[in-house]
Amino acid sequence: MRAGIVKDPREYPWSSYRVYGYAKEDGLTDRHEVYEAMGKDQTQRQRAYREYVCSNRDKEEQEIREKMGRGIIGAERFRKEIGRKMIEIKRPRRGRPRK
């Protein structure tokens, strides 16, 4: 869906979506522990998985990854404090090196 190849994830033949979202066994896909934790029974897990895939959570996760790649994540005050400490660490000390 994200790449625009299909509009419905069920249409993509190499996806595990049908296995996790609709219990259509393919003989290849193992149940993942994260999937198993998505609900108490198979019906709840399938519903939760379909909602997850169709939500924009993957977009949110991508934004987090991009922010992590840029540096420090957190409140502005925290970012400034860590940034200041990083500059202090990188700044060479004056004078003769310690023994």
Image (spheres, grey):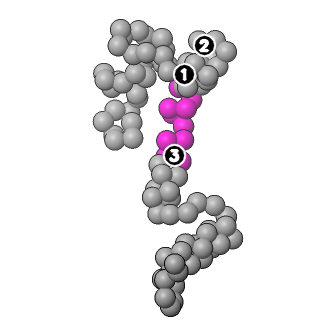
Identity of the residue furthest to the bottom in this view: 95
Which span of residues is magenta-colored?
A: 50-61
Q: Position of residue 47 (x, y in %)?
A: 59, 21
Q: Is residue 64 above or below residue 58?
A: below
Where does label 3 land, which residue? 61
Residue drawn at (43%, 10%), measured in percent from left and top?
24
Q: State the separation of the CA atoms marked 2 and 1.
A: 16 Å
* Quadrant of res 86: bottom right
Assign the magenta stretch its main secondary structure. Answer: helix
Q: Residue at x 50, y 59 (%)?
A: 67
Q: Nearer the viewer, residue 31 or 20?
A: 31
Q: Out of 74 and 26, give the one closest to the viewer.
A: 74
Q: Is residue 87 visible?
A: no
Please name the residue that numbered disc 1 is placed on.
33
Task: Answer few, some or many: residues within 10 Å of disc 2's Cα (few below 14, many 20 plus, some between 14 and 19).
Answer: few
Q: Position of residue 27 (x, y in %)?
A: 35, 8
Badge 2 amino acid: Thr
Give, as a three-letter code, the residue at label 1: Glu
Does residue 7 appear in this view?
yes
- Seen in the picture, residue 7 relative to 57 is either above or below; the reply is above
- Return the residue at label 2: 43
Q: Secondary structure at mark 1?
A: helix
Q: CA distance from mark 3 to mark 1?
A: 19 Å
Name the amino acid, label 3.
Answer: Glu
